[in-house]
Structure formats: structure tokens, C-alpha cells
Amino acid sequence: MSEFGGEASRNFLGSYLSSAIAGIDWSRELERGYRIETEICPLGDAADRVDLIVETTSHLIGVEVKIRAGLGRQQLERYTASIARRAELQNLSPQIVLLAPFRTKLPEVVSTTWFDVARAAQVASYDRAADRSFVQRLIDSFAAHIRKF
């Protein structure tokens, strides 16, 4: 979140989103402001609880996170519909991203891996180890942890 990690957090998120959703200058988009929410029901239906929502001034991105679990029945299809409807109500561009050790076959859902997150963390904590901020060190530790997924 930008209020916690400032530029390092924004760089981390921007790098991850750039790997997931091409064609958008995420650095610029995030500089205009963003917020992140966890475990959100986009339309209030508890059956459609998306792990992460990233909302910018132009985009609404739902990120479903899996580590050692599979998808529920029609889970991504439901999330796609919920995010699309909420985005429509807010006049935003919708997108669903699956972050998992497996890929989705749904063309409207972008697949990313934990390696993509680790690579984004490396970008955000790029300074020499001695020059890193606390947040950059935290992001770097997170990258080391998720490489095991």
C-alpha cells in the first residue's frame, strides 16, 4: 500500500501489474492514486469474495491468489462478472488476474505466477542491500519467501 511503503510499494505493484497487464503505463497510473482492498465482495455477494482488489483512477483489477489450492466451481467466471459489473458502475476498466502455480484456460483472465511476483519484488528492492529502505528489505524478504511456492 502506498501509505505504508510509498515509492517502494508503488514500484512493486507497478512492476507486477506490468507483467500481468501489458500496454498500460502502470507507474503513471499508480502515481495518480490507488487503493488496495483484501477479501472483497465486489457486489456484496459473499460467494464472490476476491482476494485482492486494486483500484486506480481508471482500472478495477481483481486478483485471485492460489498457493496450494485449486479453483472453486466457476470461481473465475463469477469473479469476472462481479468485477465487470462493479467496474461498470464506477466507470472503470475491469480485469481479473489469477496469481497461482497453474494457468487458467479462460481468455478473459490473465495468468501470473509467484515467479512474476518475486521478479516484481526484485525490481522494487533494486538498491544495493546496504542502501535499501525498511520497506525494500521487507519486499526483498517476501521475494525470498515466495520463491518456494
Image: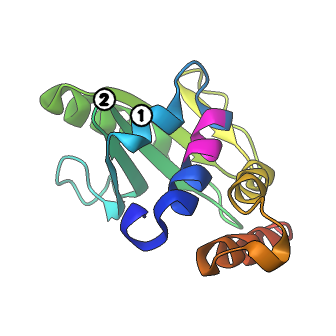
- Counting residues from the start of the chain, the first of labels 1 and 2 encountered is 1
Q: Could you tell me which residue is drawn at 40 percent across and 34 percent down?
A: 80
Q: Is residue 138 visible?
A: yes
Q: Quadrant of the N terminus?
A: bottom left
Q: Residues within 10 Å of mark 2 (few under 14, many from 20)?
A: some
User: Disc 1, disc 2: CB below 8 Å?
Assistant: yes
**Residue 58, labelled with which disc?**
2
Would residue 42 be found to the left or right of residue 145 on screen?
left
Of badges 1 and 2, nearer the viewer stands 1
Q: Which residues are magenta?
A: 14-18
The image position of residue 124, as x and y in percent, is 68, 57
**Residue 29, labelled with which disc?**
1
Q: Quadrant of residue 114?
A: bottom right
Membership of 16 in magenta stretch: yes
Q: Residues within 10 Å of mark 1 (few under 14, many from 20)?
A: some
Q: Amino acid at mark 2?
A: Ser
Q: Quadrant of residue 20?
A: top right
Q: Nearer the viewer, residue 92 or 69?
A: 92
Q: Could you tell me which residue is drawn at 25 percent across and 48 percent down?
A: 42
Membership of 101 in magenta stretch: no
Secondary structure under tag 1 reads helix
Q: Amino acid at mark 1?
A: Glu
Q: Residue furthest left?
A: 89
